[in-house]
Image: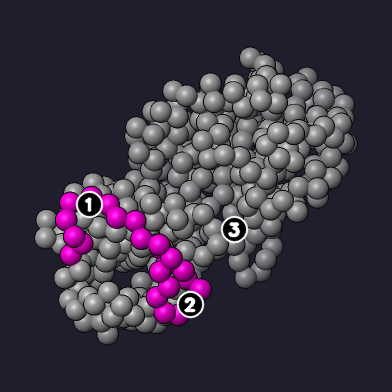
Amino acid sequence: MKRSILILNIFTAGGGDHALGKKIKDIARSTQAEGALITVNAKTRHINIQGMEMFNPGKKLNYDDPVIIVTPHSLLSPDVLSTMLADFFYQLDIITCDTVILIDEMDVTRSAASSDRDYKAALLSLCLENIIVHSLGFAKKSIGYLPMPEQEVIDIQKSAKQEIIKLLDSYNLSLPANCSLYLAYLSSDTVTTCAQVFIINTLIEDGGFLNNSAYVLVCREKHSIKRLLKNLKGTFSATPYNDLFSECHYSTMADEIKIMSHGYVRGTGNKKIHICITTTLPSTTFKSLTSMSKTGMMSGDQSLSDYLSLKERLPYYDMQTWKEPLIDGLNKRAHKLGGEELLNKFQSMVAGRTPFSGSITFKLLAPDDVPAPTLKNSLLAFNKEVFAIKADKKIREILMRYL
């Protein structure tokens, strides 16, 4: 192939931006074209390159008319992105470039002057022939999620059990055979509400199972753990929620070698539950826990995409304010497929703060909320539909068209 691919991976503070760049790099690499993944700090108006990683190195990178991919582009306003690209062309002495592909993260809230049309208009000053703009996600015009590579999914599913056993052995612990595992990744400022929704609703949903339950809550903000522990203790110390268990044990992981117990309370139910809160887990451990979990709650794009890849269904979701369009797109798909019944079910799986008003949205199930067979069937069909909406093939097709 004559053209090279240059991926400008725009990032702020989170790891999700880098993860998106690496997934796009893997798709670009599959075209066999030479290229580079270039990480760019979004905090300055002009190009601020932080690193460069080559892929498919067979010859010197061709800077004469490369295909440029910018991802995720909405971290920059249209005019700033145009300025940054012009600066990038100047620094690398790129005289000719006629194709720029903008790929955004999953459906996000944007400002009034940051529509796809605004980005295309801003880039016209660069004399580009082809300006392609796409968003990941599940809204009407979005192209889906980026799945894990199939081989990685297979490897995780094969090794997950041994990985968890090894982790527990390091704490001199074991997971009983009759214990169901639940995993949550909480990254918003509504961690208490999200944890309550996840624990209460899954206990009600799985009320017919007598298995004991272990909840691992990965709380990204370390300062939130003490408050979350206190609030959960308050929630489960009295009716109606102490009817969901016979004993509720609490613990936290202060670091990778120490678990601290915080006591337990008795309830009037028939199963024991254990709630363990930590701030971080190694990536391989988190993916193994995801694979082994009965149900999960995820947040952002990366954990959601990985959960879909490993479990082939949607998790509970901790919604950041800018992710309302993502949930809105899924709500519309749920309503179209299963009407109000399926929509209400999916809404019970989402909690978080809404944009603009800042109010917290959540839905707690009642103790007698047992899903009807028709709901189970429509939920199965909904998950099957969402799992199939993968963006990797679409992105590869676009690249092959312009290489």
Front position among marks 3 and 1:
1
Disc 3 secondary structure class: loop
The residues tagged by marks 2 and 1 sit, at their Cα atoms, a distance apart of: 30 Å
Name the quarter where the C terminus is drawn.
bottom left
- Give the residue at mark 3: 320
Camera-side residue: 361 or 296?
A: 296
As for residue 9 lying within the magenta part, the answer is: no
Name the quarter where the N terminus is drawn.
bottom left
| Crowd band around label 1 with a 10 angstrom C-alpha radius: few (<14), some (14–19), many (20+) | few
* Picture quadrant of residue 211: top right
Residue drawn at x 47%, y 24% is 159
* Picture quadrant of residue 320: bottom right
As for residue 40 lying within the magenta part, the answer is: yes
- Name the residue type under label 1: Pro
Q: Horizontally, is 376 left or right of 143 in the view?
A: right
Q: What stretch is highlighted in magenta?
A: 39-62
The residues tagged by marks 2 and 3 sit, at their Cα atoms, a distance apart of: 24 Å
Camera-side residue: 145 or 23?
A: 23
Q: Earlier in the sequence, mark 3 or mark 1?
A: 1
- Give the residue at mark 1: 57
> Do we see residue 48 in this rendering?
yes
Disc 2 secondary structure class: loop
- Name the residue type under label 2: Thr
Front position among marks 2 and 3:
2
> Relative to 12, is 259 above or below?
above
* Picture quadrant of residue 92: bottom left
- Give the residue at mark 2: 44
> Relative to 339, is 10 above or below?
below
